[in-house]
Every structure is written in C-alpha cells, then in structure tokens.
Amino acid sequence: MSRPIVLAVILAISCSSNIGDVSGFGVSTSYNAFGTTHSQHEQQRHVSSTALGMAQKRGRPKGPLRTLEVKPPMNREIRYDTLRVTTPSPKGKDETLGIMSKAEALEKAKELGGLDLILINENSDPPVCKIVDYSKYRYMKEKKAKERKKNSKATEVKEVKMSYKIDVHDYDVRKKNAAKFIAQGNRVKCTVQFKGREIQHDKLGVELLHKLALDLDKICNMESKPKREGRTLFCFISPKPEVVKAINDAKRAGEKAAKKKKEASFQALKDEKAQATTATISKDPLNDDSLSLDEILGSITSGDEGDDADDASLDELLGGDDLTDDLFG
C-alpha cells in the first residue's frame, strides 16, 4: 500500500471517531451532539446553574408573616345614605341615637369631639354605624379577640396505652387517668399494643376497649368502633355534652370569683388610702376649727421646742470646747 493511501485511511478513521474535528493552523475544535463546542456547553451550564441559584433565592423574605389590616368603611367611604347610628355609653352597652342620613351622622360625629363614623353591620336595614374613635375601636376589638382566643382552649388529645393481658390494678390506673383527661374536657385515645404473635388475640383487645368505654359511660362516649393499625388497636372517647357544659360553667364561675376578689382588694386598698389621708388632715391643727388661736400657736411651737431639745442632746453627746464654739459659732 502506498504512503498517500495510508494517510487517507488514517484521516478517514479520525474523522469518523470525532465528528466535526477540524485541523487547521494547529488548532483542534471538537463539537458535541448538540452542535456546540465543549467550552460553549460549559459556559451554558454555568449560566443555567447561576440562574437556578438566583431563582431559588427569590421568594418571601425571612421573618414573620405580615398581616394586612382590613379597615371597615368609615366617614366618607360609607356608600349608604340612611344609617342607624349608635355610640358607646359608660354602662358598656351601645346607645342608639336613631336613624339619620349620612350627612347628619357625620355632623353628629364632629359634634361629639371629631370622632369617626364606622360601618359596623351593612347587612341590616338600615345599615348600622358607630360613632367612636377608630384607634380605640380597633384596640377594643383586638382585646376581645385575645380574650376569646384565651378562653376558647383547643381540645387536646390524650392517650392511655395498655396490653390486652393487663392486670386489674394497672387497668384501674389507666381508667383513672382516662377519667381525669375526660374531666378536663379532652379527647382520649385508648390504645392496645400487641407484640409478635399476640396480634392474633385482637378480639381480646376489642373487648378490653369496649369494657373501658362501658366503665366510663357516665362521662364519655366512644366516637367509633376500635380500629387496627399495624400491631396496635385503638379507639377515641370524648366527653359528653353535659360534661363539657359543666366544665365551662365551673370555669366561668372561677373567673367571676377571681374578678370579684380582685375588685374587693382594690376597693379595700382605696378605702385604706382614703382613711390615711383623712387621719393626716385631721391631725393638722390648722384644720381643726374647735381650737383657739393660742392652742394652735402652742401646738406649732411645741414642735419647735422638741427640735431644740434634740439639738441640745446632740451637743451634749458630741461635746465641745471654746475653740469649736469660736469656729462654728
């Protein structure tokens, strides 16, 4: 085989193994299957990764969620011509001023000290508005919402666990705990646990759960039949409506008693301060009309004599000499 033919075969093999390989001026550029060079492909990968990172960093900024305040329509924003107007009273309940036009209501709000006319209920006929300072109205509304949230405690789910071959004493302990949770107004999840081949005795677990619900029948109800989940058997029991009512009544009674006790202690402290002030005023000779002028002057000067006696006793205690008397007079 001649030399030119060998060179041609080598060139053909190199071209077939590297598509797009071009030799010229000592520079070799290789192309991939997408028709781009390796350097261009690496640059595109870098740009795409940078863009992906920027996209992941976008979104909601860190920190607590901001809640936008939704203000009710008030003053000129009210679009109704006839309104039922109310205003707060010192007794706590709103006082109805009557039905009037929008212009009259705004004028009335201006007369009462430049207050706001706030739309309370637009579904009534006519719509109800209230004359009040908006900042005070918002504060009272938030305060009532906090009190409702504090008083409406969410029901918790407690749990008692036992085995299908539980002893009598242990069963009494579980029953006592479940009754305590029910008396607090909580739901209770009763669970029977099985180990290994004990799961074949699941009927005994069902009977145990029914027995527990029957023993607590006076204060609770079983919500549904016992269910099996893996190697456990469980059911939920919840307090009866009359139990929930009794719990809420006791809670309200306790809050009222605490409030009355606080008011009584505040009133006692107030009376004590008033009595102390009265006693101080009564001891002042200038406020006693029954004393004569000489008695008033005598009571005042008697205090000065006591001060002089104190000074004399101090001099006797410290002692003195002629030099000290000359220096300090």
Image (tube, rainbow, N blue to C red):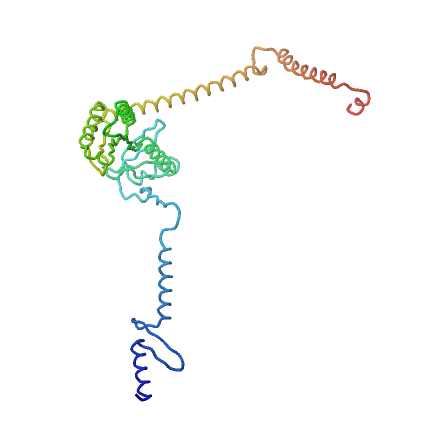
Task: Classify 250 as above or below 113.
Answer: above
Q: How many marks?
A: 0
The image quarter containing residue 147 is top left
Q: Position of residue 13 (x, y in %)?
A: 30, 79
Give me the residue at 79% from left, 22% from top.
325
Give me the residue at 19% from left, 34% from top.
200
In this view, the residue in front, 3 or 132, is 3
- Furthest residue to the front? 1
In this view, the residue in front, 265 or 208, is 208
Q: Quadrant of the C terminus?
A: top right
Q: Position of residue 281 (x, y in %)?
A: 54, 17
Quick check: 224 left or right of 259? left
Give me the residue at 60% from left, 11% from top.
292
The image quarter containing residue 186 is top left
Task: Classify 177 as above or below 143.
Answer: above
In this view, the residue in front, 157 or 30, is 30
In this view, the residue in front, 36 or 22, is 22
Q: Quadrant of the N terminus?
A: bottom left
Q: Position of residue 135 (x, y in %)?
A: 38, 38
Q: Position of residue 270 (x, y in %)?
A: 46, 21
